[in-house]
Amino acid sequence: MRCAAIVAVATTLAHAGSYAQAPVASGEPQATAEATHARALFERGLQLTAEGRHAEAAESFERSYGHYPRASTALNWAIVLHRLGRSREALRALDGVDANRDDAAEDDLRDAEALRERLRGLLATLRLRVEPEDARVEIDGRIDRATGAERLVVLDPGRRVLRVEADGFIPQRLELRVAAGEELSRQLTLDPIEAARVAASAPTELRLDEAPPRRLRRAIGVSVVVVAVAVLVGVLVANRPAAPNGGTTGDVLRPFE
């Protein structure tokens, strides 16, 4: 059954191409330039996919969907992303199928659900708690759309780099190595920039009735020894007989010789 679902996904690009010939009613919003441009991008995506240029095809389908959202466009976009191994982005692209269910064919909906099930098994899940709750989260340099203090984030397997930042707070960076199907949780609390400045500028006081720290006592001891040695050397030098010629050889360089 699962194999049949995957085969259906693999053939989706062929029948989803019906969008390219779908007429555009003149009375619909965005029925002229936007729809025409979207259709051209869609056809370009099909051509690039047939040539095996999946990265370019994904970009073309994404742009087509941006001009004129269609369920078939979103599904094709998700399929080529899946072929590229970009499972997390593919799962997000499938949201476009759900958002446009009214114009979706039954085959497209079945294929989208089969692909979604497969993608979930290929991804890791991170339960992330962030403070402040309006912090922005980047995953490998791309902004994640999840919001709130507690977020459910999906990650592609492998090494992932998360960056959490918020206005007025010191950003934090988190590096993870995750496996397919793994579930993990992390908490990141950002420190306010102002609080860090106050802590850095606070003077360090040493009370006279407190013993200095061990490291400081060691430094003081070393300083005393160095001073004592310097004084002893000075005394020895002062009592040493004067060298001939006042410490020189008596030779003086003459100019122009």
Image: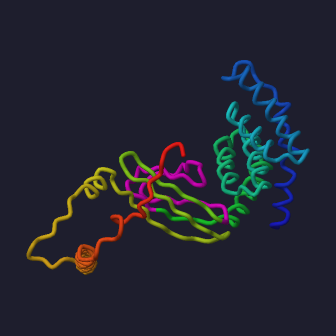
Left or right for 115, reference 193: right
Where is the N terminus found, in terms of image quarters? Answer: bottom right
Identity of the residue drawn at 11% across and 71% down: 207
Identity of the residue drawn at 80% across and 42% down: 56
As drawn, 160 above or below 184: above
As drawn, 149 above or below 167: below
Residue 116 placement (x, y as % from top left): 70, 58
Give the magenta range.
Answer: 129-158
Regarding residue 216, the answer to whether it shows in the image is no
Left or right for 90, reference 252: right
As drawn, 174 above or below 234: above
Identity of the residue drawn at 70% across and 19% down: 27
Residue 107 placement (x, y as % from top left): 80, 49
Looking at the image, which is closer to me, 230 or 186?
Answer: 230
Regarding residue 221, the answer to whether it shows in the image is yes
Q: Residue furthest right?
A: 51
Left or right for 240, reference 14: left
Residue 249 placement (x, y as % from top left): 43, 64
Identity of the residue drawn at 69% across and 30% down: 67
Q: Write down the quadrant of residue 223 in the picture.
A: bottom left
